[in-house]
Image (cartoon, rainbow, N blue to C red):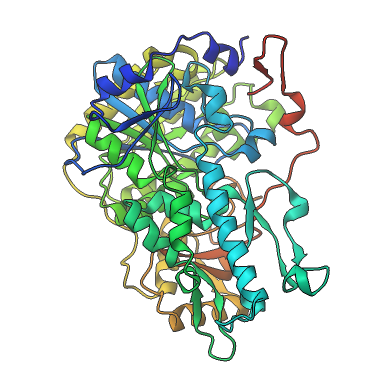
Amino acid sequence: MPTDLDIARSVTPRPILEIAAELGVPDGALVPYGHDKAKIRLGRRAVPRGRLVLVSAITPTPAGEGKTTTSVGLAQGLAHIGERCCVALREPSLGPVMGLKGGAAGGGHAQVIPMEDINLHFTGDFHAIAAAHNLLSAVLDNHLHFGNALNIEPRTVLWRRVIDMNDRSLRSMVLGLGGRTMGVPRESGFDITAASEIMAILCLAEDAEDLQVRLGNILLGQKRKTGEGVYARDLGVQGAMAVLLRDAIHPNLVQTLEGSPAIIHGGPFANIAHGCNSVVATKTALELADWVVTEAGFGFDLGAEKFLDIKCRVADLNPRCVVVVATVRALKAHGGVAAADLGIPDADAVKRGLPNLERHLDSLAAFGLPGVVALNHFTADSDEEVAAVVDACAARGIPVATCRGWADGGAGAADLAREVVRVASAFEGRYRPMYALDAPVKEKIRAICCGVYGAADVVYTGTAEQDLKRIRRLGLEGTPICMAKTPASLSDDPKRVGRPEGFTVTVREVQIAAGAGFIIPITGEILRMPGLPRVPAALGMSIDEAGQIVGLS
């Protein structure tokens, strides 16, 4: 069976100038990066004409759901049935590519290309974000070294450093060792670039001016005695950071395997940030295409909730339809089937796993949006298993479309595309946020935990209570909530699969992302710096005698 890389190389890409011309990119706005990718320079905004479709999923399992593959397949399917569509996705992080996950450009015959470039350095956006982030780190430590005129309490410093690689040894460290000339010793560490607040800022900024303001609003720490906040603007470094991000803020144009346009930009983690591609990418696509397909990280509980309560609220977006991706295999996993037995037909196990899908459909209804369930099809799926999903969704009035985009590209996703067009075209309303921005912070958190996760209650540690007091003191209560929670369960316990009931969510701390414009309640153990597995994917990669990459998946 050919690999994703083999399939990607079997296609001759269309010239990017041709893709841009068909999409209607204005003259002078395109900045080519070779023949197969380009940046679209931001200009005067046109009135968005496109209809936005969000792709989300059930709670992820090791069996896989294929959200990105379905997103690309749906975009190709819309083109296949004659619709003018653009897919808007996140950029992959090098850390997971070299670690466990492998590539993140779709799969099979539903990919975006050039696959190697997208999965590796692409147009350098991640490196620019890391440079801007680490510039702020360097200026902050330099300020502490040269007298600390702002009277910053070093123990309150929140700002760490970043690198776009999985490296657990960098999670915690002591800086400034080696004598008086080496800086002020303090505890710190590294996060992965995708977890940087600057990544979230880039993806929520409306334009370069908004970007610079948000960079200045980054909270770095507090002053001694008074507890007053110290921000990046107090160091005067936001302008230089914006300079480093001058090109990175422009979205990237590439194409799918079937030559339809794809805009790929930004890549914030969905467990610690909002997990969506950039506002400027989505709005650019909406200005140029009739249909825009985008996705949000992890399942509906983390990705779609943040997309709707943070991104859509900030950018004034209104999706017309939500596609919830499921697989028979993943539903059986939620039904208690061991990984080794997922290929064995078992309709009863599918029925036991369906409550997980139903919980996400309940959340979809609470947001007031119509939906379609995309059943990402595997060859081992039996008719009885598929029927179990179709019947359960039909009882709720939710259509199900089988998607074979991985195997057959746009033709395999045509049925899903037709169903999406039908459902989205009939919707003329607006979605309902899960909470009001001016509600108390605890009320907003409870709305998410109880209304989306299905929790019975929310409790707070003493540390979290102190964090909430600091948020009130800094005047940051009126911001959206960006929950940090395990993606493996609707609860905050990764071992509780399916649809847990009667559980309590424990908020152990609440972090502040003032530049991004949200606060982050932390539940469970959330890592901002992943580690490599015992056998990293990087060990299987090399360059062959012809100079081509091998082993990238």
Q: Tell me the quadrant of the picture where the N terminus can be found.
A: top right
Q: Nearer the viewer, residue 517 or 377?
A: 517
Residue in the image at 47% along x and 77% along y: 471
Number of labels in the image equals: 0
Q: Nearer the viewer, residue 424 or 155?
A: 155
- Which image quarter: residue 96? top right
Q: Tell me the quadrant of the picture where the C terminus can be found.
A: top right
- In the picture shown, does residue 253 fall above or below 443? above
Task: Decide if residue 196 is on the left or right side of residue 304.
Answer: right
- In the picture shown, does residue 362 fall above or below 399? below
Q: Is residue 430 visible?
A: yes
Q: Nearer the viewer, residue 260 or 510?
A: 260
- Which image quarter: residue 479? bottom left
Residue in the image at 45% along x and 47% along y: 303
Residue in the image at 67% along x and 52% along y: 529
Task: Decide if residue 147 is on the left or right side of residue 171.
Answer: left
Q: Position of residue 399 (x, y in %)?
A: 32, 30
Q: Position of residue 261 (x, y in %)?
A: 35, 24
Q: Position of residue 154 (x, y in %)?
A: 65, 77
- Residue, far bottom: 225
Q: Nearer the viewer, residue 258 or 240?
A: 240
Q: Is residue 489 visible?
A: no
Residue in the image at 32% along x and 51% along y: 207
